[in-house]
Amino acid sequence: ADPGVTDTEIKIGDVNIMTGPASFIGRAVAIGSKIAAAEINEAGGVNGRKITIITEDDGYVPARSFQALTKLIEVDEIFALNGTSGTANVLAMMPLIEENNLPTIVSTAPNELVYDPVRPSVFTLGGSYSNAFYAQLKYIHENAEPENPVYGLIRQDDDFGLAIEHGYDRAIKEFGVKDGARVAFKKGTSNFSAEVVQFRSAGVNVLANGGIISGAANILSEARKLGMDMQSAQVWSEDMPLSVNLAAEAGYDYYVADYVALTGPANDAFMEKAKKYVSDEEIAAINRYTYVTYASLMAMAEAMKGCGQDLTRECTIENLRKMENFDVGGIVAPLSFNNEKQLSGTALAVYQIDAKTKTFTQKTDFIDY
Amino acid sequence: MSFLHLEGVTKKFGGLTAVSNINLTVERGQIYSLIGPNGAGKTTLFNLISSVLPVSSGSITFDGRDITRLPTHAMAGLGMARTFQNLAVFKHETVVNNILTGLHSQLKTDPLSAAVFWGRARKEELWARERAEEIIDFLEIEDLRNLPVGTLSYGQQKRVELGRALAVNPRLLLLDEMVSGMNQEEREDIGRFVLDLKEELGMTVLMVEHDMGIVMDISDRVCVMHHGARIAEGTPAEVSENPDVIEAYLGGGSRAA
Amino acid sequence: MDFFLLLLSTGLVIGASYGLIAMGFALVYKATGVVNFAHGELVMLTAYVAFTLSNTFDLSFIPLMLITIPIAMLIGLTLERVFIRPMLGEPVFSIVMVTIGLAVMLRGITIMIWGPDPHNLTAGVTTDVIMIGNLPFYAAQLMSIAALAICMTAAWAFLRFSRIGIAMRAVAAHETAALLVGISVKRIHAMAWALSSALAAIAGVLFAMNFKLAPDLWFQGLKSFPAVILGGLDSILGSALAGIVIGIIENMSQGYIGQGLREISGFIVIVIVLMVRPYGLFGDKEIERV
Amino acid sequence: MRTGHFQETTGQLIALTDNRVVISWTAALLIALVLAPLLVGNYVLTLMVTVLIAVVGAVGLNVLTGTTGLISLGQAGFLAVGAYGNAVLLTDYGWPVWLSLPAGGLVAAAISLLVGIPSLRLKGLYLAITTLAFAFIVSHVILYAEPITHGPNGIFVNGAKIFGFNVQKGAPLYYLALGVTVLVVLMVLNIQRTRIGRAWLAIRDHDIAARAMGIDLTRYKLLAFVISSFIVGVAGGLVSLQIRFINIDVFALILSIEALAIIILGGLGSVAGAILGAVFLTLLPEGIRLFFNLILEPGSSFYTTYVYEIRGVAYGAVIVAFLRFKPDGLIGLWRDQKKFWSNWPLAY
Amino acid sequence: MLELRNLQVLYDRAIEAVRDVSLSVPDGAMVALLGSNGAGKSTILKAISGVLSQEDGEIVAGSVQFEGESLAGASASDIVRRGIIQVPEGRALFAPLTVEENLLMGGFTRTRAQTRDGIERIYSLFSRVKERRHQIAGYLSGGEQQMVAIGRALMSDPKVLMLDEPSLGLAPQIIDDIFTAVVELNRSSGVTVLLVEQNAQLALEITSQGFIIENGRIVLDGPSDKLRANADVQEFYLGISKGERKSMRDVKHYKRRKRWLS
Ligand SMILES: Nc1ncnc2c1ncn2[C@@H]1O[C@H](COP(=O)(O)OP(=O)(O)OP(=O)(O)O)[C@@H](O)[C@H]1O
Ligand SMILES: Nc1ncnc2c1ncn2[C@@H]1O[C@H](COP(=O)(O)OP(=O)(O)OP(=O)(O)O)[C@@H](O)[C@H]1O
Ligand SMILES: [Mg+2]
Ligand SMILES: [Mg+2]
């Protein structure tokens, strides 16, 4: 059999951001895998084999991601990879993944750079950043557009920001609306006053807000100070409670588009289940990254199950490639990897927050864009 | 043509004129002393001659060549070396390395041959080592050879500095208070040695000293500075008789030797 | 015009924050000759301490600071005592390295205690918009500017009227000589660390109030380097002023040129300034005299 | 008992070492290094490559900072330039790797003049921060010079072959890195024992005296910049070969600080120190990880929440503790041992 | 009042700079410490001042007693406060500070008013220093710096003044002034003086007792006038042979010449 599989065990690797300011992602991911593994193992495992997760920290540094994956492959002999840190980090691991034909589901970096060109063993879960912004702008355009709309974009000056700009471009072209201002900023910026002043003088009233967490919140806060009346489309990280706490204060009922279900019975059910398997401290750290990783491990397990006792990487990849409308308890849009890009489906739902109550309402169904 | 010639050399630091309009001529093979009260501008004049500081006005010629505007590092190549009043050794380096550094301008190794360290670079290095060992031997600091200079006593460091200046193989040697911090025996040694440099190697020595013993004993000529200006010049005997000099510098019935 | 004034006013706000952080750097440098690479981490740590205090006791701003500052000073003293003092007399490089190690530790410890999630810190200060002329401000933004002004005045008075200021320079200039005239080098170092931590606390709390509290707050330390350098590493007042200058330049360059220039404009400015003045605008020149 | 030894000829004085013990240990080490791919697994080999690259980078930085006393926080910038130089020439222009790798170094060396010339008058930390500024600016330029660098998209680096061997992984990469390391170390050791190395040291200790000895500061400072960044650039090229994908995140500023940490911890100014420091600091996280895996059960909730950060804290703590007890770095430890054993059993 | 017993000092735990030195400086006396370069004189002073640790040195045996109490464990600033001050060799001024600030720091252990008086006293002692009062100390000439260094030490109004080669770099006249001042200080205020000096002639003239140290050991000691009469001392420290001062041109015992010039 392939490495990582014994009669009783399947080892799955996870390289993630376990240290530093972005470690809320890695922690949430680790919890997602843990819940999924516990659930699968409790139900008898994958054809009798228990899943073991081995997590390595990369501190968000691509060179360390490479090192960590080398260790997982060579020392721990993992069978598959589920949990892949940020975009640059996945890309740094890509050559190793390809070389080892390592079944991999990328769940936290659905970036074009990851799935285009498509790598045979790599599957990407999620709608893209670009579609997420397109979806929100489309919703705003159709349902909530202010008079004399002027659009504006603020994005990080990296691969992630670029993806957002693609979605924004598409929207601007398609709707034929006025493109007031585009601004790029460096990762780690906290002072956005100049940018927001630029938006104000351009008269922007629909903002594609590519800031994340405190960045996004600071942008809104500056806008509020300048008395700007606007709609804001934001990155899906802004639907996490930790971001909402920061951003809601500015009082904007902003939008997000996500492939994760933020509200509804599916969520409640998931939380119930989670309480069975993880500690309170871990429960507190749960966010959307927990859902997606849970979902991707479930999908991986499903694919492995299909191989029966003779579990190989090749077979797992085959099965993943055939996966269609795999439902993960409704917490994410159903997964289909049976497309050219091996992208789980581009379906996204648009949500809007009520800044006062800090709750989201779902504005659209999971739709493909 | 005189060996070293200063014409109207002046140095100002902001409002302070540290050296004012100095004319001075040193002939080849002389031991020439520069004396004067503290703050008279002697060290500053040394700094001007060795091009460590740019002159404010005036000109300096050395061996027939105008060196007024040459960069500091050109001096060693022209055959001028100096010591410093306040110790300017390479503290973290060993005694050998300090002395080897004095040989810098006589070596030619370029980065490429240095990297390979073969052929010329190697030969040169062998030569340099031999030369350095000679100097170490002479200064009787063999047992300090591999110690970092920073850990040596004050007097030992002065000696290393002298060794480093000698390594330059200078025709003009500038000594700024060489014997301060040495005892009488050592002073005598240095005095004797300076004489030998002159007599046997034909070296020209320009020195700043407060030790009248050595100045009067070995100098051929003496120049006295006060407030940046030259107040007297002549043979030791002439100068020590000069009432201005006695007034400004020597003082009556000095206790100092 | 409006555009310009808005950029200027917000430049002042971020500039004040740079200035406050830079003052802390300069203070330690002035007394010890060491750039404290853990200063940004101290800014972050003290802000988190204030966050916990403010949540636990529901304090308003002034009382919060009255408690936070002494705690910060205590932290500073402890760090000095445990990590820096044993290094007395060692090469400056090694001490700088210790502060780097310390920085790594503080970053980890902060996340271990408070977790990676970012927070709001309001410290009971209103979040209403205040108009000055026709320029809008948040109260916390005005407070930053005021805090910088107060700290600068205090520092000026301290340096002007006490011999300690001179003693600090003396210690940095020649440690052994300072010992030989009876200056307790240890005490001066401890004091510098304590005061610099107090500044860190003020800077940290105000930064967190204006720009959120997150475990990447330490990065503001690096971002304040241009201010420290522009002012001159050992000039406490100079670096405070330079903070303002850098803040304004950053905002202007972003507002008028864009291209993500803001984050590097400060660095471009110091490269240019240093070419003309190698010791910053107000720094002590190294004495080169032979 | 060896009670110190005496050199008889000047030839011995200029040799890198005249100590038989050192020679035989170095030889043994080299043999072990050459045989390593036969003896160790792939992961260890990867680690060793990382260590070798760190050694090259540290030896390079040491030329500038340790030897010449010009403190640089621009390491990340030079690494990036070297890596991009290699990556672009190799991947986009199809140069063979044995050309593109040194060419990347040359690009870094050329760029270093851009930093070096304006910083000639700067001292100490002023220079340090200026080089930090340089690193910031480099990363900005790389991000925006999209036509050449692919900007935010980064570059996949592949196709590096020497004699038909793919030198981007496994033993071939290891041998390439080892070869480069040995060359670089020898080259720097050689330069350091000639007038050039002494000129650098002189500049570090006392630049006025250095000038009076005939050393042209401009020339030698720039030379230090050029040689150092060439080496660092080559290290960057090796990084790009090893991880096969680069973007600006790979060259985070923290690298500059880590690089400085390596040479300080190793012992400033000494090549051996830089090597020891690089080995130590690169393997330290690995050691800490193993340690915690021994004492803790992976997978516990404590583990997921705290252990990774604790490892980071331990990393910092080891550095601090180490300096506390050995402020002159690993090389100091080494010297102490040597002193102790050559004087043993007489105390002094 | 100041007494060293069997002092042994090591640098870097390896270099023995002072071995088994015992000497005592009686209250109100002036004592000279002579010896050639590297003999260990400065090391002894550093040991008394408690600043050896700055250079990785330590006292490994023996003790330093001051007014009957051991100074072991006392910090450098304590020692200054107890009244022992040192003028270090090589001046060690605070280079970036002005002359006046340097003096001010000399009075760090004293009150403001005392400091003010002290500064005036120094200015009257060294007019040159007064002229330069607002200049950056690092830019002074060597001799001017030496004056500031001595002035700075005097600022603390010490009981014991330790001078490490005070005449270094000073013009003859100033040396005179300084030694006169020191003698005066000793006479009028009873300041005890421990003088390290290369100018043995001068040192032995003003002191009552002398110690000669070589290679870290005291090789000769006794009343100063006795030492002056000693033939070896005359030969090596005073430059006198057969009863009269010889000119350097006549010095022949120049041993290394052959090797160097051949
Ligand atoms: N770089 C400088 N900046 C400002 N003033 C200076 C500088 N160098 C020297 N001076 C001043 O110039 C004057 C002359 O100094 P210089 O060192 O030449 O004196 P000197 O004759 O060597 O005295 P000494 O015998 O004490 O060494 C002094 O008053 C000194 O303060
Ligand atoms: N920091 C140090 N580290 C190691 N060795 C030292 C250190 N300082 C002095 N030494 C050694 O100790 C010995 C005594 O030095 P010290 O400075 O006491 O001599 P000194 O009598 O004052 O000489 P000088 O007349 O030259 O000033 C010397 O051999 C010197 O090499
Ligand atoms: Mg002088
Ligand atoms: Mg001495």
Image (cartoon, coloured by chain):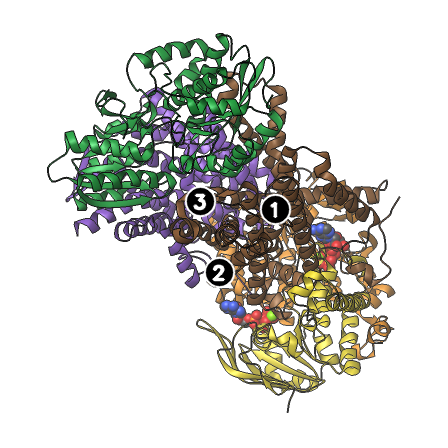
Chain colours: A green, B yellow, C purple, D brown, E orange
In the rendered structure, are the residues bearing label 1 and label 2 in contact, judged by CB atoms less than 8 Å apart?
A: no
Residue at label 1? D263
The quadrant the C terminus of chain E occupies is bottom right
For marks 3 and 1, give the one nearer the viewer: 3
Chain for numbered disc 3: D
For marks 3 and 2 on the same chain, the one whose residue lies earlier in the sequence? 2
Q: Is E39 situated above or below B160?
A: above
* C253 or C231: nearer the viewer: C253
- Amino acid type of disc 1? Ile
Q: Report x, y in % for residue D343.
A: 83, 44
Q: Report x, y in % for residue E115.
A: 49, 52
- Amino acid type of disc 2? Ser
Chain for numbered disc 2: D
In the rendered structure, are the residues bearing label 3 and label 1 in contact, judged by CB atoms less than 8 Å apart?
A: no
Whether disc 3's CB lies below 8 Å from ligand 2 is answered: no
* C213 or B222: nearer the viewer: C213
Whether disc 2's CB lies below 8 Å from ligand 1 is answered: no
Secondary structure type for disc 3: loop
Q: Report x, y in % for residue D271.
A: 67, 50
Q: How crowded is mark 3: few (under 14 residues within 10 Å), some or many (20 or more)?
A: many
The residue positioned 13% from the left and 35% from the top of the image is A146
Q: How crowded is mark 2: few (under 14 residues within 10 Å), some or many (20 or more)?
A: many
Residue at label 2? D119
Residue at label 3? D154
The quadrant the N terminus of chain E occupies is top right
In the rendered structure, are the residues bearing label 3 and label 2 in contact, judged by CB atoms less than 8 Å apart?
A: no
Q: Are marks 3 and 2 on the same chain?
A: yes
* A148 or D328: nearer the viewer: A148
Q: Report x, y in % for residue D230.
A: 57, 56
For marks 3 and 1 on the same chain, the one whose residue lies earlier in the sequence? 3
Q: Quadrant of residue A324?
A: top left
